[in-house]
Structures are given as C-alpha cells and as structure tokens.
Image (cartoon, helix red, strand yellow):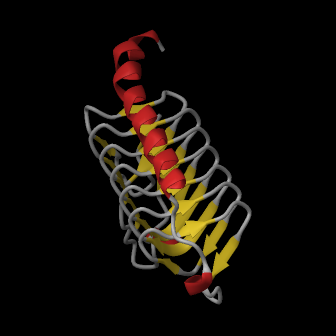
Amino acid sequence: MIRRNPRGDLPQVHPSAFVDPTAILCGLVIVEENVFIGPYAVIRADEMDINGHIDPILIGAHSNIQDGVVIHSKSGEKVVIGQRTSIAHRAIIHGPCTIGNGVFIGFNSVLFNCQVDDGCVVRYNAVVDGCHLPAGFYVRSTERIGADTDIDSMPQVSADASEFSEDVARTNNEFVSGYKRIQNEF
C-alpha cells in the first residue's frame, strides 16, 4: 500500500522497483531503481520535527528490504539505505540512521541512531545503537554495539560473510524482475 502521510507527502517509487502489495510505504519515502520490498515491510516517513520538517527515507538502487522489516524515524530524521544493501527479515531500522553500500543487516537486528559504512555485515539478532561502524566492520550474531563499545578490537568482515551478503543481494535482485512479471496476478 502506497499512501500519503498526514502532511501530504506521497512515496516516490521507481517504476523498475517491486513493492509487495502487503507492504506499506507512507510519506516521504524514495525508492530507487530495481529495489525489492518484500511482504509486510513497513516504511514510514510521517513523523515531523517541531517545525513540521521531515527528511526522506531513501532506499538506494538494487537494495532489498525483506519480509516484515520496519523502517521509521524519530522527529523526521533522515534514514538512508545505500545501494546493493540487504535488510533481512524483521529487522528494524530507526532513524536517524545511515547505512552504506553493499551492507548486510541480519534478520531481527535493530539499528538506531547510527552510521554503518560500506561493506559492513551485521548478523542476526544484533543491536547497533548510537555509534559509527567503519567500512568492512563485522557484528556477530546477538552482539550489542553501542557508543561505549571498543570497535577497534572487533573483527573485519570475512570473505565468507562478504560472499554471503553478495549472494543475498543477487537473489533479491532476481526477485524484482520475477515479481514484476507476475504482479498482475496479485
């Protein structure tokens, strides 16, 4: 469902993107080309700051937002999802938040008030809160990374984790053309 927010902003979805009919996109959401947005995803850019301002939620080209993902932002803060980035099932991305290119965010993970640079991998059930992850950073499953975490002692993304992330992105890119072909059947 594509709908306006109370301020009147309507999502902008590139014609080559696929948005599942059960997904909800509300307000100042920009979806670039060849993006896959899966079933029951919710992307809402509807909360304003005290001056009535909202920054957009931007989903970069060739990215995928999988089943049940929630993307929202406090007080109209910006959320940017880079290109070729995968946000896996039931993850929560709560702005302000900037996620770079070629990033993998695992299922059930929660990101809030953070910057995640290119090529990072955040595995399942992890929490990233109030910090900056440099390029190529790896967050293990169930780990909590915050402003007080010593990230210099943590590992970089392995070749296996990087290949897994790229495979998920490739698979979901193939979904776009497949689902676009059959979308009139929904």
Toward the viewer: 2 or 126?
126
Q: Position of residue 59 (x, y in %)?
A: 37, 52
Give the quadrant of residue 136: bottom left
Give the quadrant of residue 166: top left
Toward the viewer: 167 or 117?
167
Number of dots carrying numbers: 0
Left or right: 51, with 122 as reference point = left
Up-down: is 130 above or below 66? Answer: below
Up-down: is 27 above or below 51? Answer: above
Q: Position of residue 112 (x, y in %)?
A: 58, 70
Q: Residue furthest top?
A: 185
Q: Residue at x 64, y 47 (%)?
A: 90
Q: Position of residue 186 (x, y in %)?
A: 48, 15
Q: Residue furthest front?
A: 159
Q: Position of residue 65 (x, y in %)?
A: 49, 44
Q: Residue at x 56, y 32 (%)?
A: 39
Q: Residue at x 36, y 61 (%)?
A: 56
Left or right: 24, with 139 as reference point = left
Up-down: is 2 above or below 175? Answer: below
Q: Residue at x 40, y 37 (%)?
A: 170
